[in-house]
Amino acid sequence: MHARACSKCETVLRPTARYCARCGSAAVAVMGARLEFPPLSPGETWRRLSNGWTRLDVRRVLGQPLAIAFPTPHDSDAPALEEWTYRYTHPNGTAPEIRGVVAFLTTDGQVHSWLSPNWVAWGE
């Protein structure tokens, strides 16, 4: 397993770190490579998402995320969100990569919101 480093100050992070101990920025965990098409058409898969789903529910439908970004500490009243990023490449290799993001509330681990990939860029 590769050691993770802070994207801002290059400090080596513990494997379980959510924040950099030196500068306080959110640790981003790179989980896997780009995804190919899921078993259903990609648009159908993302349309199945629902508020209140758990991380396990999302992982079952969308698979392993490319990256997980943890929230930075803040004092505002806005909810702290953990964001999972998914990236897709078109099978023909000529269309642009597209990304989707699912945001979870850190308080209960349930889906708060999501931004579906721009399937229009692929003519879907």
Image (cartoon, rainbow, N blue to C red):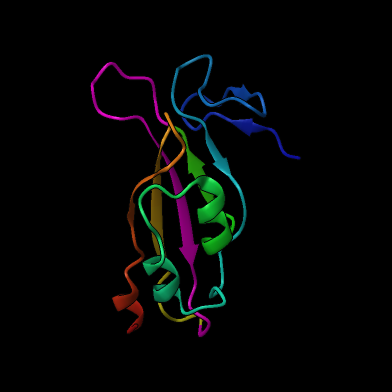
Q: Is residue 101 above or below residue 94?
A: above
Query: Residue placed at 42% from the left, 28% from the top?
Result: 107
Quadrant for residue 4, please give it.
top right
Q: Is residue 22 above or below residue 82?
A: above
Tell whether 112 sits left or right of 42.
left
Quadrant for residue 119, please give it.
bottom left
Residue 76 lies within the magenta run: yes
Which secondary structure is most common in the magenta stretch?
loop
Query: Residue placed at 55% from the left, 73% from the top?
Result: 38
Tell me if I can see residue 65 in this picture: no
- The N terminus lies in which quarter of the figure? top right
Tell me if I can see residue 44 in this picture: yes
Q: What percent of the width, then of the height, locates residue 12?
A: 63, 24
Q: What percent of the width, then of the height, locates residue 70?
A: 46, 33
Query: Residue placed at 23% from the left, 22% from the top?
Result: 77
Q: What percent of the width, then of the height, locates residue 110?
A: 43, 42
Query: Residue placed at 56% from the left, 55% from the top?
Result: 59
Q: Which residues are magenta?
A: 71-92
Q: Is residue 110 above or below residue 98?
A: above
Q: In front here: 7 or 57?
A: 57
Residue found at the far right of this picture: 1
- The C terminus lies in which quarter of the figure? bottom left
Number of marks present in the image shown: 0
Q: In front here: 45 or 100?
A: 45
Residue 1 lies within the magenta run: no
